[in-house]
Image: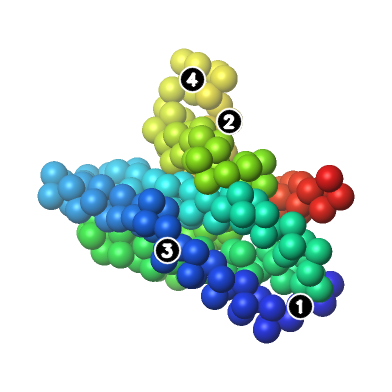
Amino acid sequence: MNISMTRIQAIFMKDYKEFSRNYAVSLMIFVPFVLAFFYNKTGVNSISEYYLPINIGFSMVTAYVQCCLIAEEKERNTLRNLMLSPASLGDILIGKSLFVFIVTMIVVGITIFLVGYNPANIFIIAIALMLSSVFYIALGTLCGLFAKSIMEGSIIILPAILIFPLGSYASPLSSIYPALKFMEWLPSSQLVLLAEALEGSYSTTDVIIPIVTIIVWSIFAWIIAAFIYKKRMVD
């Protein structure tokens, strides 16, 4: 797979311009800020509460913005032109993800500051947050490929916005409702488990399992996204 930095940069700049022009999408970045600010003022006393605005930021900023950017391309019939251009699959997927990844890291950083969270091991947490971002970008890409417009994309992404951030809150209910057992393995739940383990004496397994789980989610989501993307090229 040939990767062209020039093409990636061009796609990156195109996404930046579309994002800055679409206020309905760009204003979503302030949602986790507001939630983190109020959480800080009302008092946060658990890791899961620290991570609620962070996980909501991943779903409402990362996945939502990525979905809308892809859906807008389809609505304007420019995604087809991009698919048929000399840009490779890697150029397009990296270029369409890079802008949202940078925005996500900025949003997550500000959210962590506003909520008053001080990670016990910032290096490991930073890796987990970046991997989570990769997963949510894939999720947004996948939803965007199924949408035909921004409005439709906003509806398609809604279940992901409602389900994925609340994994750690649904996990305690899995003993009562076995159907919720899978929520324990969502990236949001694994992120909280990792952060909780780092606050005390932790083993290598406590770190590896959550990170590997998030990586598996990311790889699986990107494989599906790439498959759907190639299928759209021949539709």
Tell us which disc is closer to us: 4 or 3.
3
Real-space Cα distance between discs 1 and 2? 36 Å
Residue tagged 2: 182
- Classify mark 1: helix, strand or loop: loop
Viewport quadrant of the C terminus: top right
Real-space Cα distance between discs 4 and 3? 47 Å
Please give the name of the residue rendered at 13% of the width and 50% of the height, measured from the top-left corner: 41
Name which residue type carries label 1: Ile
First reached walking from the N terminus: tag 1 or tag 3: 1
Tell us which disc is closer to us: 1 or 3.
3
Please state the horizontal and vertical placement of residue 68, each as a whole percent of the image. Answer: 53, 51
Name which residue type carries label 2: Phe
Q: Which mark is residue 175?
A: 4
Residue toward you, 185 or 175: 185
How many other residues sit within 10 Å of disc 3, few (<14), some (14-19) or many (≥20)? few
- C-beta proximity under 8 Å, tags 4 and 1: no
Real-space Cα distance between discs 1 and 3? 28 Å
Residue tagged 3: 21
Q: Which mark is residue 3?
A: 1
Name which residue type carries label 4: Ser
From the viewer's perspective, is 125 left or right of 89? left
Real-space Cα distance between discs 2 and 3? 38 Å
Name which residue type carries label 3: Arg
First reached walking from the N terminus: tag 4 or tag 1: 1
Quadrant housing residue 90:
bottom right
Real-space Cα distance between discs 4 and 1? 47 Å
